Image: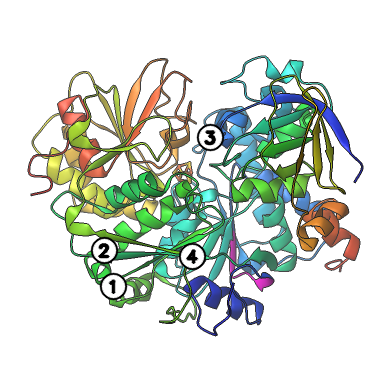
Amino acid sequence: MKQTGAKTISEKILSNKSKLDAYAGDIVEAEVDYVMVNDVTAPLAFKEFEALGSEIHREKIVLVPDHFVPNKDIASAEQAAEMRRFAKRWKIDNYFEVGRGGVCHQVMVDEGFVAPGRLIIGADSHTCTYGALNAFATGVGSSEAAAVFAEGKLWFKVPGSIKVQLEGAMRKYVSGKDLIIKLITDIGVDGANYKTLEFAGKGLANLPVSDRLTVSNMAVEAGGKAGIFPADSDTLHFVRKFAKGKWEKVDPDAEAIYIDERDYSLDDLVPMVAMPHLPENGKPVSEVDVEIDQAFLGSCTNGRIEDLRIAAEIIKGKKVAPSVRMIVVPASSLIYRQADEEGLLAIFVKAGAFVSGPTCAACLGGHMGVLAKGERCVSTTNRNFVGRMGHKESEVYLASPAVVTASAIAGRIVAPKGAGA
Amino acid sequence: MKALRGRVWKFGDHVDTDQIIPAERLTSDNNERLGSYLFEKVRPGMSTSVKKGDIIVAGRNFGCGSSREHAPRALLQAGIVAVVAESFARIFYRNAINVGLLPVECKVQADEGDMLTIDVEKGKIINETKGTESTFAPFPPFVQELMDKGGLIAKIKEEKRCIK
Ligand code: SF4
């Protein structure tokens, strides 16, 4: 690719962290700010790390049990215990116990590990979530996480970027989830493979940080290595509240070279649902006629306080349909506490929903909401693959918190009244 | 690397890691027997029919979804030594290299059970059953070196970059 001196956000962060003048296509070795592993990916990483006989970059390591905790069975109990032991043996302070943590990606945000300009990797594919806060963040495997435990750095191929230009403002009950489902539907589940989705445009001012986190979270569902936003005043306001340590925002250069450009007018967006079994099967909710057995509100995609507020507003004074189980799982302990203080949890419970403390829960079919054969779930999560939430003949429909909540009340997939108005 | 020769298992586009190894198997007690759960939801029985050295031929975006390194490990443990796909999801591709499963980006004509030879040095795939041949681009030198050394951890070990 032509090197003009002008860079995308990805090229800038990877240049800064490798101390090289790097452009798309280059392979660099870059200093990593943080490496996160969860209970599912940690044991393999620990084993690889310990086989190395290395020193440890303990200050860079973040350990978050979230997938199968609170321990769902003996095997997951043993696995979670391995994490606890590793944290103790290697004196890792950044270990977040059940009740004081939550879904790994939300914990990374809440605890201030995520900030503009940082390079963060995680042994979890949705590590790309942090791009919402102007960080370059991407998922890796356990061995690579182990390599970073030992070396504090990792090799990266600098990705080319697709510019996604946003204009306008979303209508009521339309959200970042609808934008990202639409985008994935347009470019396909491999439309951004090996690439960064870099967001830009005046519409950003109308896309709150919580929505951006949802959008970046699902960049990987288009194959994206990262989904990055520039840091505007909303970002700065947000990270000043949460971020630990020093950071510096990174703006793209005006002359930066993009592989492709896509334009979206936020005004045109409507509530969307991604039909089984791929996130690219998006359809406007108005074209869908599906009865459901379960409605899941939670996960690193849409378990934030803003999501719970919208859901509570819709369900307040109403009831979950008799044929439906609604499961509400705030993404972190911080959000859980906040939702409690705002009275949101009580609204869900009163409506007949099941509310739990933070965990990945049904999102990956681990526990607390596994689907039986033939069952259908409308879910605020990010994946609807075959068998993702349970039986291989169950179905997951991805949608926004507003649609999931309205559907829980109606017993079928619908948008809330007044959506898109 | 010498040439690999094995029978084909055929898959389509977007084979995700939840299919390769379901999430409920991802507890550390299973880490040495991941192969026995390979594709258990979508192709039950496959894990016991795979012969050591078999090869998967798939379409686009193989290994999309979760970052679980358990996926290439499950394939290897079951006996699969290479995946030939039109394209790979990026995390899977890196994981495959790190655990020693060969990922070859190439479009080949093959049916289930065909006999395939992959010659990495020559960048050639020969379908012996069909009598056809395809070529693939050489791996970038950096990636080739990683593979030759047996993955990132093995490379670090060899270079003793981090021994106290
Ligand atoms: S909530 Fe779901 S997608 Fe997010 S980290 Fe947990 S299992 Fe993965």
Q: Is residue A52 visible?
A: no
| Residue occupied by mark 1 | A234
Amino acid under disc 3: Asn
Q: How is the image coloured?
A: rainbow
Q: Quick one: label 2 or label 1, which is nearer the N terminus?
A: 2
Tag 3 and tag 4 share a subunit: yes
| Residue occupied by mark 3 | A71
Are the residues flagged by discs 2 and 4 in contact, CB closer than 8 Å? no
User: Magenta segment: does it hold B62?
Assistant: no
The disc label shown at residue A211, or none:
none
| Residue occupied by mark 2 | A208
A147 to B90, vertically: above or below: below
Q: Quick one: label 3 or label 1, which is nearer the N terminus?
A: 3
Magenta stretch: give its range.
A28-35
Chain letter of the residue beneath label 3 in the structure image: A
Chain letter of the residue beneath label 1 in the structure image: A
Question: In the depicted view, which residue is nearer to us: B152 or A57?
Answer: B152
SS at mark 4 in the image:
loop
Any atom of ligand 1 within 8 Å of the CB at mark 3? Answer: no
Chain letter of the residue beneath label 4 in the structure image: A
Amino acid under disc 4: Ile
Are the residues flagged by discs 2 and 1 in contact, CB closer than 8 Å? yes
